[in-house]
Image (cartoon, helix red, strand yellow):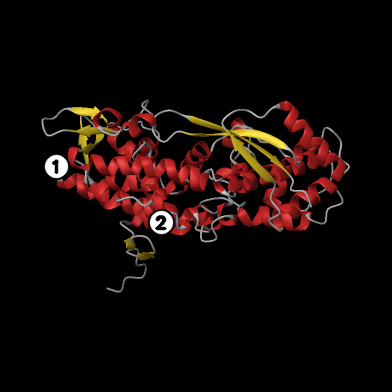
Amino acid sequence: MLQLNNKKKIINDPVYGFVRVPSDLIYDLIEHPYFQRLRRIKQLGLSGLVYPGAIHTRFQHVIGAMSLTVQAIDILRSKGVDINDEEKDAVCAAVLLHDMGHGPFSHALEHVIIQGVDHETISLAFMQYMNTQMNNRLELCIKIFKNEYKKKFLHQLVSSQLDMDRIDYLRRDSFYTGVQEGVIGHDRIINMLNVHNDEMVIDEKGIYSIEKFLIARRLMYWQVYLHKTVIAAETLLVKILQRASHLASSGKELFASPAFHYFLYNKPDKNNFFNESKVLQLYSEIDDFDIMTSIKVWCNHDDEILSKLCRMMRDRKLPQIEIQSLPFDKAVIAKHQDDFMQMLPVSKNDVDYFVFTDSVKNEAYSIEGFNIKVLYKNGTTADIADASDLYNISALSHTVTKYFLCYPKKV
């Protein structure tokens, strides 16, 4: 009999090679327009302005994370862990859909387009809406995503300090940026996974791979995710959206796609985001292209502040940035503000668009929540921070805060 709809597809991934679509459910999710939107959202926001190769998308990332989940489940099954086919499908779907709620440029505009709502909450809203469209085929997926399913270790594959999301983004982001410090032995980590007392653990033999994983994560944060130029670029992007939002609230008409226009001129909160399917539908229509197209047009806007900010972004004339361990002295900030106001006649109220300070945090490992445990041969477990013979691992549990100051480069 002729098969009219072959769902057993193979995706050629540059990081892992051939990735098989494991089931009809996963195929249907990948084909959904909401999921296809992830092709138009960059995984690393504006990091491509520093690392030219870092232009991969959320679509590539979640496909990779899903493929790692399939491998992890196969390994756990080989060790006697009971995971049936329905559970396998559901946890793969949860990993596949966990980033659905990301807005344009991923984390760069978190809480900016929709204030007070994080991307995980929006991802859940997408899952629930898609579930109604797919005859409740995502019921178990949603339970696992919300950690409401009886087998708690399945949720840890989706969200924990050693989930498939983190393993993929470290491996993938190091590949596309060329930052070798982020390379991890993902195959060995997955082969060392196990379950003990309904909790995901790592076999004792895998302890050194986890040490490397945690150190790589810390280095990738400082070298890529929190690279000072990336911070300057992404904060500039936020300032552009803040200025556009200010002009929109003042009644100024701005060029924007219909979906982006809605979020500029309306401020949906968490409640009406979930109660109105229209808001979710409009959110599904905005991506990186909506933002960058508007920025290109706004370069010629008659508001001098907006146009200058947009030209800085379009032409990569990014602010100068300084980073240090202590907050910047108010006198130093005021001096940069005064210098800029002599360059461009802006009011004291508006100078914050060009001279601004904030902080970033880096926590490679948290000892709270779903911490990483090592399973010894005698059946006992220990936190990786205690099991490791590296002092660095314990040190990684401390949050490091750094402060930055941005101001325009003098011409």
Q: How many marks?
A: 2
Q: Amino acid at mark 2?
A: Asp
Residue 307: x, y in percent?
80, 51
Q: Residue 286 versus residue 209: which sits nearer the camera? A: 209
Badge 2 local density, few (<14 within 10 Å), some, or many (20+)?
A: few
Residue 339: x, y in percent?
82, 39
Residue 380: x, y in percent?
16, 27
Q: Residue 393 versus residue 276: which sits nearer the camera? A: 393
Evaluate whether residue 196 shows in this view. Answer: yes
Give the side of residue 116 with respect to residue 80, left or right.
right
Q: Amino acid at mark 1?
A: Gly
Q: Residue 137 versus residue 39: which sits nearer the camera? A: 39
Residue occupying the point 38% across, 52% down:
171
Residue tagged by mark 2?
28
Give the side of residue 75 with respect to residue 213, left or right.
left
User: Which is nearer the N-term, disc 2 or disc 1?
Assistant: 2
Residue tagged by mark 1?
80
Above/below status of 251 relative to 12: above
Q: Residue furthest bottom?
A: 2
Above/below status of 24 relative to 281: below
Badge 1 local density, few (<14 within 10 Å), some, or many (20+)?
A: few
Judged from the image, the secondary structure of the residue bearing numbered disc 2 is: helix
Q: Are marks 2 and 1 in contact (CB under 8 Å)?
A: no
Residue occupying the point 47% across, 55% down:
59
Query: Which numbered dot is residue 26?
Result: none
Residue 291: x, y in percent?
67, 52
Above/below status of 252 relative to 21: above
Judged from the image, the secondary structure of the residue bearing numbered disc 1 is: loop
Which image quadrant: the N terminus? Answer: bottom left
Evaluate whether residue 94 shows in this view. Answer: no
